[in-house]
Image (cartoon, rainbow, N blue to C red):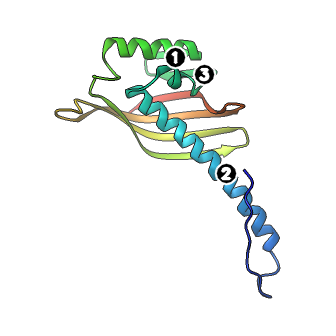
Amino acid sequence: MEVQLSYSKNHSQAEGNLANRCEAVVSVAGMSDELEIRNVVARLAMLADGGDLEEYAALFADDARWEMPGAAIEGRENLLAGAIERRSAGTVGPGSDTRHVIATQAVVVDGDEATSDAYWQFWVNTATEPSIALFGTYRDRLVRTDRGWKLAHRHISYG
């Protein structure tokens, strides 16, 4: 994405305009990356609750790792198999009346890698008496690929 910014010049602003324009272009590119990363995290939550699991799995890097207390999963195919298993058990997905909610999120982009820290909530009984069953923090590492930003590592903590 190329962004052209223009500034009206007056004699007191002439110096430093080039530096300001360069910073603005870098900032816009950084914002674009950050928005894409936020959308990866949001889509993962939404697709865990419903939608195409192949699309869900496509948000992970090929060698992605998922860690949570008592369990770890490695590889996109294993992550997809776990999602299918959870749906089959009825613990998440269509008809389960559950929702993954992403709350406060901070993203830091560093070249072709990024980190995202987000608070999450897992709601149950959403059609009748909604309540939070679990909550915690996602600590994510994402990588830029030729297919866009992908989740490479997720560490889940509770509380």
Indicate the secondary structure of the residue bearing disc 3.
Answer: strand
Give yes or no for contact between labels 2 and 3 (Cβ–Cβ under 8 Å): no
Q: Residues within 10 Å of mark 1 (few under 14, many from 20)?
A: many
- Which quadrant of the structure image shows residue 8? bottom right
**Real-space Cα separation, disc 2 to disc 3, in angstroms:** 23 Å
Quarter of the picture containing the C terminus is top left
| Precedes in sequence: disc 2 or disc 1 | 2
Q: Secondary structure at mark 1?
A: helix
Which residue: 72% across, 31% down? 146
| Disc on the earlier residue, 1 or 3 | 3
Q: Inspect the image, locate mark 1, and give the three-letter code of the amino acid beneath it.
A: Leu
Instruction: Work out whether 20 lies above or below 32.
Output: below
Disc 3: CA contacts within 10 A as few (<14), some (14-19) or many (>=20): many
- Residue 78, how many percent across, how many down? 53, 12
**Residue identified by numbered label 1:** 79
Q: Which residue is mark 2?
A: 30
Using the numbered discs, state the Cα–Cα distance from disc 2 to disc 1 in whole angstroms. Answer: 29 Å
Callout 2 secondary element? helix
Q: Which residue is mark 3?
A: 64
Residue at the image position 30 percent from the left and 28 percent from the top:
98
Residue 139 in view: yes
Q: Position of residue 106 (x, y in %)?
A: 53, 47
Decide: is 28 above or below 80. below
Name the kind of residue labelled 2 in the image: Gly
Image-based side of 148 in relation to 39, left or right: right
Q: Locate residue 94, reporting x and y percent.
A: 32, 23
Q: Earlier in the sequence, mark 2 or mark 3?
A: 2
* Residue 158: percent from left, percent from top: 39, 31
What distance separates the C-alpha of mark 1 from that of mark 3? 8 Å
Q: Residue at x 37, y 16 (%)?
A: 87
For this rendering, which residue is in front, 156 or 5?
A: 5
